Image (cartoon, grey):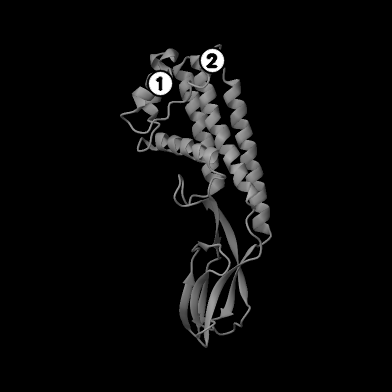
Amino acid sequence: MLLGPRLKIERAKQHITDFNNEAAAFNARNPYRIVIEPHPERSGIMNFTVRVMEEFPDRLTCVVGDAIHNLRTALDLMIFNLVAPTNADMASRVQFPFAKSANSLKPTIDTRHIRRAGKEVVDAIIALEPYPGGNRAGQMLADLHNLDIADKHKLLIGVESLAVPPDFQIADGDRIVATFSSNSFSAKDGSIVLQMPMPENAKVGDYIYASPHIVFRQGQPFERKPITPTLIQLTELVEQTIAYIAGAAGLI
């Protein structure tokens, strides 16, 4: 009964590993630089400009979507195996009961036929609060669900890359005039992160590398959170959720 969910989780883990390996290889190629360039209109003023030597591969956003979908499906399989393991006709109706609010959770449990699994399972799901504004675990599960829906109905889950320079200071003689401390900037070619007179001991064309920081795009669940750690956290949550429901059902 737990084999299907476990296989889906293992597949999600493989997608996460694939994403992480390719993102690390992208990082190792030093795709972003912050370059000193002359201001086109203000004499003596330098622009510290983001220059993108290589764009983050769009195909990797599909890998993120595949990981999300496998985690979401693992939850559905767990519930289906408890409710209607021999009734294929119910497959489209029996799903993990994600709700839109606390008030709609119990009606959603009824719609998804969860009560067939027994009171203990229903009580366990109610305690999870799988809806926006629920407890921490419930909110994360709801965000997982909403990301999966977005990936089904849109081309790609939103992923963006930020440029993060190393910590450094810019001096004018003995005076520190600018400090960078792991600030992140949009990794859009031509983005200007600083304007100032030419620092001493520097020249036009000098640059530093800025590390890619791959995050979920703004305006969606987990916005601006790093992809790999978030996916790992979601995987652990789904594993814990399945174990919790299995325990409530007396399977472990």
Give the percent coordinates (x, y) of residue 140: 44, 38
Residue drawn at (49%, 81%), measured in percent from left and top?
196
Question: Which image quadrant for residue 31?
Answer: bottom right
Residue 252 in sight = no
Residue drawn at (53%, 43%), measured in percent from left and top?
154
Whether residue 10 sits left or right of residue 193 in the image: it is right
Q: Answer above or below: position of 16 versus 91.
A: below
Q: Answer above or below: position of 183 versus 233.
A: below
Disc on res. 156: none
Give the percent coordinates (x, y) of residue 117: 44, 14
Q: Secondary structure at mark 1?
A: helix
Count of marks placed on residues: 2
Give the percent coordinates (x, y) of residue 48: 54, 74
Q: Which residue is mark 2?
A: 89
Whether residue 51 sits left or right of residue 148 in the image: it is right
Distance Cα–Cα, label 1 vs label 2? 15 Å
Q: Secondary structure at mark 2?
A: helix
Give the percent coordinates (x, y) of residue 248: 44, 18
Question: Which image quadrant for residue 231?
Answer: top right
Residue drawn at (36%, 35%), measured in percent from left and top?
134
Residue 112 in sight = yes
Q: Residues within 10 Å of mark 2 (few under 14, many from 20)?
A: few
The amino acid marked with disc number 1 is Thr
Residue drawn at (43%, 26%), measured in percent from left and top?
97
Q: Which residue is mark 1?
A: 111
Q: Please tell me which residue lies in front, 82 or 27.
A: 82
Q: Earlier in the sequence, mark 1 or mark 2?
A: 2
